[in-house]
Each structure stands twice: as C-alpha cells, then as structure tokens.
Image (cartoon, grey):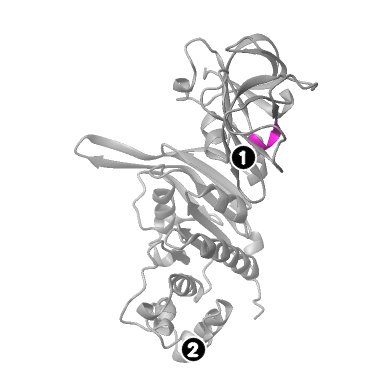
Amino acid sequence: MNVSPQPTSDSQHFEVDSLTKVFSTDEGPVRAVDEVSFEINGETFFTMLGPSGCGKTTTLRMIAGLEAVTSGQIRSNGADFRKMNAFERNIGMVFQSYALFPHLTVFENAAYGLRLRRADQETVKKAVARVLSMLRLDGLAHRYPADLSGGQQQRVSIARALVYDPGMLLLDEPLANLDAKLRVEMREEIRRLQKSLGIMALYVTHDQEEAMAVSDTIGVFNLGRLIQLGKPFDIYANPRSLFVADFIGKANFFPVSTESADGAVAKVRTKTGSAIEGVPLRQAARGEENWFDTNADLMLMARPERMWIAAGGKPQVDGPVLTGEAQRVQFLGTFVRYIIDAPEASRPVIIDTPAFVEGVSEGSPVTFGFSPTDAIAFGKPA
C-alpha cells in the first residue's frame, strides 16, 4: 500500500539546545545528560547510539515529555516543547518492551491513540486499517498480543505510534528483544515506513551495525555527552575521539611517540622502534587520558579492513612493516579475520581480509601493516 508523505515534514526543524538532566541520588546528584545539543530537519532518520547508561534513552524521554528537563531547550519548528505536555507534542513512541495492552486486540491496541483523541469510529476504522496494512498485520486485527510472535507484537506497537499521523516518531531500543535475523528484517521495515511516511525519526540503540544500517545521521553518546554527530560513514572513517574510534566498528590501537609533527601530520615511532611517517594527527577528547601508556604521547588507530597481513618475512610494501604471531584465524563468511599478538599494539590486533592468506595459520609468525594515511594518531587531551 502506498502512503502519502505528510506535506509539512520537509519544513520540519527540530532542535535540542544544551539539554541537561540531573538525578538526585543517595550518593549525590548524577548528571545523566550533560549539555546535549543537536539539530535535525525534514524526514531525517537520526540515531542516538552509545553504551548502556550513556544518556541516550534519558534524552529521548525528555524529548517525549516522559522525563522532566533539568535545563536546556527542546524546540520543534520554533515551538517550545517544555511548555507542552507529552500528549500535545504529537509524538509517536515505540518502546523496547512493546508496552501492549494484553486484554486488548491488535485492532484496539493500534487504535489506542485515536481513542484518547476522541476520534469517531469511522476515522478509527480507516486509520487502523491503513496502518495494519502498512505493517502487514491485516489478518491479525482480532488477535491478542499473547497470540503473536515478537516481531508481530513490535509491528503492533509501531502501528499504535503511527495511527494518528504523528509529527515525529521516537523509538527506544525497539529491536532489542528480537532474534538476530528478525532484527535485520525489522530495522529495514522501520526505515521503509519512516521514509514512506516522510516523517522525522529519533531512534535509540546500542547496536552499532543497526545504527549504521538505518541512519541518515548518528549521534554517538558517552557518559551523558554527545561525543560526535555525523553521517554513518563520516563517523566511522573520521572518528574525533578514541572512544568513537573504538565503539564504532573494530579498531586497532598502537601506543606511539612523536618523532616530528607538521601541522595535522606526524612522524611517529612504535614501542619497538618502527617509524611511521605521514600519519594524520588529531587530539583525543577530554577524559581520554587513561587511554595512553606512560611512555607514549600518541595513540595510533587503524581499522582492520585497511590493513594487510602476510606470512613471516618482510614483504616489499610501502609503509610500516610490523611483526607478530597469529593467535586465531576465523572464517566469518564474507571475510577472514586474523587475530594477531604483536608487541607494538596495546591489545590483540584484528585484521580482516576478503580471503585466506597463504602461509598464515594459527601459531605462525606474520608481518602486517597499513598505509599511514589510513591511520589516525590521537594526541593526549589538552
């Protein structure tokens, strides 16, 4: 069924400015959300990504009106959300737990928002039929939640959030309770629906792959702060902090010292004396001092898929040649992962290749390396 986009979505502008939440606890005040600011427009699919306890769900709940704001502003097209109750914000909310009423049918669960708005029966019937069709739930209208699979229950919760044509869709870890295959199917379904309807979506998850797959824009959270904001590729390829580099995808870290530096490029030296020239240089985020070894003033990061590996010896390649021992060889379907014990690295090195590398097996000596321009050297925070 084709769904007509809402005509106002293209002009929608949503802004969070210095949003802060402080909880009072027996141990004292806890700053759960710390001066978070971002802006999104139109039908953007915006994901708040981060580990448990980083403040992303609390931020979403303040936007929804389910959590009081300590300080800061939330505005939609200039309207001050802090002056509106949750009902007035016209937001569709999808919860991790589905939050369905067990004593109501699929139809009545989906109709709940319209019933609260005192819509007439004909409007309810048409709107519910429309969203159930969109979500492929047509034949299940008279069933109860207990008779549905997890994926079907989540579809009902999404139908309930969409039935009254909200101006914005908020989703809090909506796929966390589903199995791996169903998660992939449902994330694509959510993305399809959001784009078909032409509405803005704010999505919370701790799953990096999920965020990368569905998002137009990602905000990475840690310790209550918004650490980096950008498109999925930009965040992966150009992390602005060691935390983001480590949290988004896989990353290898090498403690190094500065040999020389020229603006945004440095020549560095590893713990065993290997020199690496032409490495892009940037500063780590505040609070990341504990990432650095005592005898190293930089931490070099390289992605597994941007590295090469060969059997012991010194292949003729440009860039650094490092040595180690293959600890594990894992065939993962579309690629082969090598886990290397190397003296230069702060932890086992991960290298991903499209096929098995001749002569490399578990326990064998290896050489490996990367192009310096594919790495990033992070300096200690100022």
Q: Position of residue 335 (x, y in %)?
A: 66, 45
Secondary structure under the numbered disc 2 in the rendered image: helix
Determine whether label 2 and label 1 are within 8 Å by CB. Answer: no
Amino acid on which the number 1 mark rests in the picture = Arg
**Label 1, residues with CA under 10 Å away: few <14, some 14-19, many ≥20:** many
Main SS, magenta region, reads: helix
Amino acid marked by disc 2: Lys
Frontmost of labels 2 and 1 is 1
Q: Image point 42% across, 88% down: which residue? A: 142
- Which residue sits at x=63%, y=52%? 216
Above or below, 173 against 197 in this view is: above
Find disc 2 in the rendering and name its residue: 125
Distance between the Cα atoms at labels 2 and 1?
A: 53 Å
How many numbered markers are drawn? 2
Residue 306 magenta: yes
- Quarter of the image where one finds residue 197: bottom right
Q: Which residues are magenta?
A: 304-308
Q: Which residue is mark 1?
A: 337
Asked whether the viewer can see residue 59, the reply is: yes
- Where disc 1 sits, the SS reads strand
Q: Is residue 159 left or right of residue 196?
A: left
Q: Residue furthest bottom?
A: 122
First in sequence: mark 2 vs mark 1: 2
In the rendered image, residue 266, in percent from the top left (x then y), is placed at 69, 15
The picture places residue 131, in percent across and down from the top left corner, at 54, 79
Identify which residue is drawn at 35% across, 53% down: 67
Label 2 Cα neighbours within 10 Å, binned few <14 / some 14-19 / many ≥20: some
In this view, 76 is above or below 284: below
Q: Position of residue 358 (x, y in %)?
A: 72, 35
Q: Is residue 156 left or right of residue 21?
A: right
